[in-house]
Image (spheres, rainbow, N blue to C red):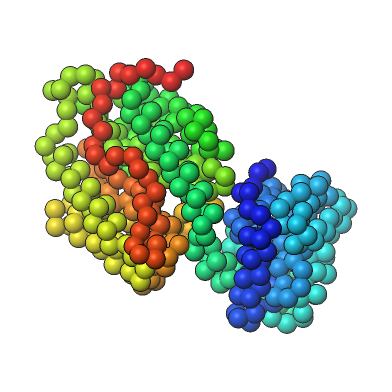
Amino acid sequence: MGWPPFDAADLGDRLGRAQAGLRSNGAAALVLGPGADLRYLTGYSAHALERPTILIVPATGTPTLIAPRLEAMAAAASPAAASELIDIAAWDETDDPYRLVELYLSGAGPAGRLLVDPGLPARHLLALQRILPGRSFGLATEVTRPLRAIKDVGEIARLRTAAHAADRVVAQIADGALVGRTEADVSREVGDRLVAAGHQAPAFAIVASGPNGASPHHAAGDRVIQPGDPIVLDIGGTLDGYGSDITRMLWVTGGDPSNGPTTEFLAAFDLVRRANADATAAVRPGAVCGAIDEVARRVIREGGFGDAFIHRLGHGIGLEAHEDPYLVAGNDERLEAGNAFSIEPGIYLPGRFGIRIEDIVVCTDDGLDVLNEAPRDLLIVTGRGVAAG
């Protein structure tokens, strides 16, 4: 498995800040399994298996990555281990790995909470709780959330590269053949093109045509795209470990202008586009997440489609497709420079159509940086271009 190419200075700084966070929270150690927090602190993409791989980050001292023997060579080659920022402790098939965790946690002190990866499988967490009956547990997000929510220059550069790669794929799909193909076929093409554009893997390729667009997370199926269909194209993947996520709207005419968008659709599209633009313009340090959601929601509500905007305005993005911060009503958290997130208002009318326009933006010291550059206009296409091949 690969990892983002962060150097020892990046990882050393992250580990140091994580340990400082543990001390300020009165916690003894982080206990992390395979996932985004582990990648963030070590650059290691561990396999999530029934065999536990667990990183112990004590409040003071050297962190230790406990890994099954068959994974130890890969773990030792990870950036943090290769830079001697962490130790590797391998366990054999006949060992009890949880006893090894207990041993290394004893070095973190007998008291203090253990902050556990929220994604650690229950079988591993329950085993740790049985073997450590006197310890109290909390969530690692107390420490890792504020670290990961603020992207550094290198992370923003990777997010920008991923965004631009996804922009190119949107243009390629819009210029290609659509009429007569199933959503699933076009979705497969999207995945292939994301990889060709530099992504390690596609994460999702939503191709929701006609009435299927009213389901925001529609799974591309066997519906055949026809002239007169709107298409919600929501695509993304990972590039150098960081995510892309963009949604654009297509309308397929088949080459006949009489199959163009309806007046009702254009009116709804204009509301979504204005909601996207107004919410984006409201981004700045100190802005309240829930208030930005309301900026977009007000536009759509005043246009008569308030009940049709059925999800939050946006989500953070980074090593994970969805992470903090979340732009949703009731979230009083204030944006900080370095927060990266989506702006994606939508209108969804069951049985008729759906509309969404999504960009990834970064809050900066003087406002914001919009990473996606693909046009936000309705892309009216013939759908009869040259198919991928």
Residue at the spot 60% in from the left edge and 75% down from the top edge: 21
Give the image location of residue 356, x and y in percent. Answer: 29, 45
- Horizontal arrangement in the rendering, residue 133 relative to residue 313 (left or right): right
Q: Is residue 45 above or below residue 295?
A: above
Give the image location of residue 93, x and y in percent. Answer: 85, 50
- Horizontal arrangement in the rendering, residue 231 relative to residue 87 (left or right): left
Residue at the spot 54% in from the left edge and 42% down from the top edge: 239
Q: Which residue is nearer to you in this view: 229 or 191?
A: 191
Q: Decide if residue 131 is in sight here.
A: no
Give the image location of residue 27, x and y in percent. Answer: 65, 78
Q: Which residue is nearer to you in this view: 142 or 146?
A: 146
Q: Which residue is nearer to you in this view: 12 or 256?
A: 12
Q: Decide if residue 108 is in sight here.
A: yes
Residue at the spot 39% in from the left edge and 61% down from the top edge: 363
Q: Which residue is nearer to you in this view: 329 or 59?
A: 59
Q: Is residue 118 above or below residue 381?
A: below
